[in-house]
Amino acid sequence: MNKQILTLLAVTCACGPTPATTDTATDTATDATSLQTDSDTSGEPTTATDTNATTEPATAGPTTSEDFDDCGSSSDCELYQECIDGQCVDRPDICDSGVVSQVPYYPPHVMYVIDKSTSMFAPEHHWDHDGDDLDDDGFVDDDPMVMATPKVSHWYSVHEVIALIDSSGKTSAGAVLFPATEAPVEPGPDGCILNESPEVSIAADNIDTIFAAIPPQNASDLGGGSPATQALELAYQHFDPPAAWVPKVAILLTDGVPDCSQVLPPDQYDQYDDNMLPSIEQALDDDIYTAVIGIDISSEPDAQGVVARDVLNEAAIAGGFYTNNGDEVFINARDDSTIGGLFYAPDNYLDCTLELPDFPTDSTVEVYVGGQMYPQLDDQADCKTSDGFKVFEGSDPFRVDLCGEACLQFQELNTAEFLLVCPDA
């Protein structure tokens, strides 16, 4: 299933041997975010709306001379026609046609994967969350007569970020804490524990449940290690959307790099865990995005020589959800405009999973985007790297997934055309 962050459009389908002409343009773009996504997550497919459509076979050829159109080649004719003896006539092998030109927004399923390590609460790590005192003199940078806002804990910012995401777009959400609430603050392998299941399972309108399940915004004296890899893997295992095409996004909220590696001896609990990136890459292969929101991220090497900013940049790219912000492509927790636009409805998504309810479920189709015919791909083809379309075998209503260049062209042109090949053709 394919989705890119682009302008939302709605859907119409005009079916029958001659597609109806429908004005489908609906300009609702807001360009709320500069995020880039690798294709291959998607919302529920489009639903065609032409109630006058028919799937009865078309009669081959024109019935009167008034039906003739002059042509030099078949490219001068409609897609469902061919040029014979200078005239456009209906192709005898085509029984129906459809045009999908607009796509609705469908909200994603989100799992917040939340860092609850010691640095998230420790007073020595409190930070200038709104960036009004970057020179750290206690006064607003552009107005030295005004006191700056107080510094806050990283954990305080977690609540602000989740509330902003929830207020700006409709999602079904759950939450995983790492480590678990019961983890001791004192350093040690016991600080790496996780619950066996998410603190909050994914459900609609779940923000109050999430805030009730995690420590309050002004919590202190909590902590533990940073088992982010295991927490992400736990989150990936608990996406259970009602349909395969529902977008799935894990949102990692953290202030540093993972430790608590499961492949190192327990006494090396505080060593950097380099297994997070492969886990994120595997999740993207399984159609789960990972967005990374960094809180007060350092660009300097730590005691192990690890640069947190570099690690989170790599994680954002591996997760297929990243920004165009130069040296920092993960999402900065100060970036309210980007965070507020993550799931802004309805203007962010243009879906490449398309539905034609008037076509039989076992249809054979030809698919055209921008006048170019694209091939049907086999079930094993990688939709991210192959150009063409895949059919949801046995789905009712009939659905196809545009892949590669076909998806990109559809997102640029907002129109795809379909021809239903007659069963006996």
Image: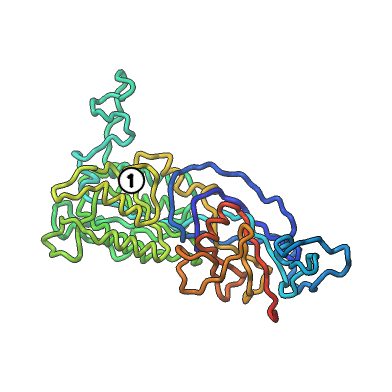
Of residues 258 and 68, the one nearer the viewer is 68
| Identity of the residue furthest to the bottom in this view | 424
- Colour mapping: rainbow
- Across and down, in percent, residue 60 comes to 79, 73
- Across and down, in percent, residue 50 comes to 72, 61
**Which residue in the protein does label 1 denote?**
158
Task: For mark 1, give the secondary structure.
Answer: helix
Quarter-wise, where is residue 133 in the image?
top left
| Identity of the residue furthest to the left in this view | 267
- The residue shown at (45%, 64%) is 385
Q: Is residue 174 visible?
A: no
Of residues 159 and 416, the one nearer the viewer is 416
- The residue shown at (35%, 39%) is 334
- The residue shown at (33%, 59%) is 199
- The residue shown at (33%, 34%) is 130
Q: Residues within 10 Å of mark 1 (few under 14, many from 20)?
A: many
Q: Is residue 282 above or below residue 28?
A: below
Q: Is residue 422 above or below residue 340?
A: below
Q: Is residue 116 visible?
A: yes
Quarter-wise, where is residue 143 in the image?
top left
- In the picture provided, is 245 more to the left or to the right than 338? right
Residue type for callout 1: Val
Of residues 145 and 5, the one nearer the viewer is 5
- Across and down, in percent, residue 33 comes to 46, 44
The image quadrant where one finds the C terminus is bottom right
- In the picture provided, is 120 more to the left or to the right than 71? left
Task: Please give the count of numbered marks on the rendered protein.
Answer: 1
- Across and down, in percent, residue 119 comes to 21, 46
